[in-house]
Image (spheres, grey):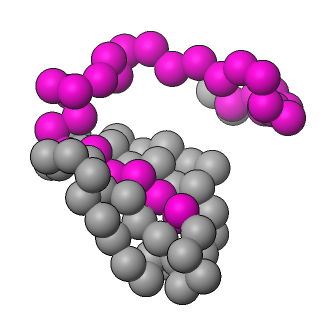
Amino acid sequence: MKVEYFTDTDSLYISLSMNSSAASKEISEGVVLDYDADGNLSGIDIDNASRKIDLHEFSVTQLPYVKQAIPA
């Protein structure tokens, strides 16, 4: 999973797989779900993200998460 925030467009993209998007569906204004060729959810795009979610906090819990050190 990869989370990217684009300041120039105020959009947040959550990539859930390495598969390319083959179809998209807007589920609410500015929130689009991307699906791969097999119909699996591959990503979530959120426009005007700073108005819809708190971008100042990010936490990960209850996943097979391995903490990685980020070089300074």
Q: Is residue 35 left or right of residue 8?
A: right
Residue 8 appears in the picture as rendered: no
**Closer to the camera in the image, 23 or 58:** 23
Residue at 51%, 20% (x, y): give it: 58
Residue 69: image location, x then y, percent: 76, 28
**Magenta stretch: dominant secondary structure:** loop
Q: Is residue 13 left or right of residue 59?
A: left
3 above or below 36?
A: above
Residue 9: image location, x then y, percent: 15, 48
Residue 11 appears in the picture as rendered: yes
Residue at 41%, 66% (x, y): give it: 34
Residue 45: image location, x then y, percent: 33, 52
Which quadrant would residue 38 be assigned to in this image? bottom right
Residue at 45%, 76% (x, y): give it: 21
Q: Which residues are magenta?
A: 41-70
29 above or below 16?
A: above
Q: Is residue 52 magenta?
A: yes
Residue at 15%, 38% (x, y): give it: 48
What is the quadrant of the C terminus in the image?
A: top right
Which quadrant would residue 32 be assigned to in this image? bottom left
Q: Is residue 9 left or right of residue 26?
A: left
